[in-house]
Image: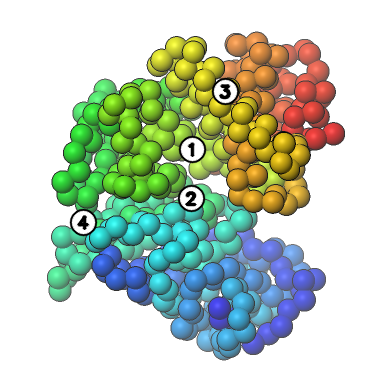
Amino acid sequence: MLASNVQASADDIAAVDLLESDVALVIDPGSAGVRGQQSLTFDKLGAGRRVTFETEKLTVLQASLDGKAVRLVEDGSRSLTLRLPEAEAGGRHVLKLSYEFEAKGRGFVRQDELLASSYFACDWMVCNQEDFSDRFHLTLSLDLPKGMRSIGPGGIASRQDREGRTRTTWASGEAFPAYVYGFAVGRLERLTLETPCETELVVFAPPGASDLEKMFEPSCNMLRFFEEKAGAAYPAASYAQVYLPGSRAAQEAASHSLIGGVFLDPILEQPQEDWVIAHELAHQWWGNRVTAQDLSHFWLNEGIVTFLVAAWKEQRWGHEAYDKEIVLAEARWRRRIETSGDVGLAHDGSYASLGDRRSIQYYKGAVFLDRLRDAVGEEAFWQGLAQFTAGHIGRSVGSQNFQSAMQDQTDEPMDTLFDEWVWGR
């Protein structure tokens, strides 16, 4: 990747607080090449004189900082390091860039004339992917051939047609961490589900996709269920689900989700196979709006959501369906113990593989919440979850925040239980 011609020591790197990002992408979904421009407003935190941003797949063509050109050199890194004009703590800056990238491989889903981004936001804009505590507002303009649709964060701020192309600008409205920002573009048909929910529920799918209303029918009841358990209403006017036939995609984004047909299609024959809709919708609270402060606390995103899929199934299909999900989660976790040993949910070290990480953060997390539910009792458990969720909307949190919310619901000390399961003590 491109970097400035300044070599920086770790002690000289200042942290940053991203505030606003304005990104414009020119996309032709049938081609992998994408051109981008970005304006990024940030505050420097601390006395370091240099800041670093991830660029991953991006080839930066031009850059300016506070209106002055940045000289770029190729050094083989995946980051952009910038020297700031002063070393004092604080200071607001504007970084502007033009760049290009190949929208393929990790972080992208491609199908004919359809392109969607998935999780790795720094593969299509300059950001800091793993800094989950850094929330910022995004304005995203998507320039496409006329006749193609786009889905972006928040709502549509403007749309312009010119010279056979359509430029749609999306504005997030809320501030989110980088990893939940995403988009989908291409030849997509739009279906608005007819439901009693106040939130508009929309499905996008390639032309010719069938049975969409039947497959996505549970969405409204799921949304109401999660609102109740969160103690907080879904805050946006609409929620979109992008159906990708034949895909194994399953990814939440700021105001939409990618739903792969491999995971969803079985619902037509087995209605209880509704987990992927529930899982990605639940992330609109646990993950997108109440976000783990870093990867060591990621069970607060994935473990809670995996458990809540089981809780949804319990409400819709009965306790046997709940037990089935918890037994399955425990089996997956214990297989990991047999091969790699066990660690606490808030383990801050490395994992041998992504599968190992998921065995702990998704599956052990869900089993822990089942045990916690039994330990504190039904009413106290759900009140604790609602207090944790509603009290931290729009914030990044750690496991201690969750423990405190649960402790508030009972006079019984929670230290021993949390030490065993969460802290690994």
Is 300 or 48 nearer to us in this picture?
Answer: 300
Q: Which secondary structure lies at badge 2? A: helix
In which image quadrant can residue 415 be found?
top right
Question: Which residue does the image show at 45% across and 12% down from the upper left?
Answer: 318
Q: Nearer the viewer, mark 3 or mark 4?
A: 3
Image vertical order of residue 402 relative to residue 312, above or below:
below
Inspect the image, locate mark 3, and give the three-letter code of the amino acid beneath it.
Answer: Ile
Residue 154: percent from left, percent from top: 37, 48
Q: Which secondary structure lies at badge 3? A: helix
Image vertical order of residue 141 relative to residue 85, above or below:
above
Inspect the image, locate mark 2, and give the three-letter code of the amino acid beneath it.
Answer: Val
Q: What residue did someone put label 1 on?
A: 283
Query: How far, Cα to Cα, is label 3 from label 4?
Result: 39 Å
Question: Which residue does the image show at 54% across and 17% down from the upper left?
Answer: 323
Q: What residue did someone put label 3 on?
A: 326
Using the image, tell me which numbered label, if any, was put on residue 154: none
Question: Which residue does the image show at 46% across and 34% down from the upper left?
Answer: 279
Q: What residue did someone put label 4 on?
A: 187
Residue 400: percent from left, percent from top: 73, 34
Q: Earlier in the sequence, mark 1 or mark 4?
A: 4
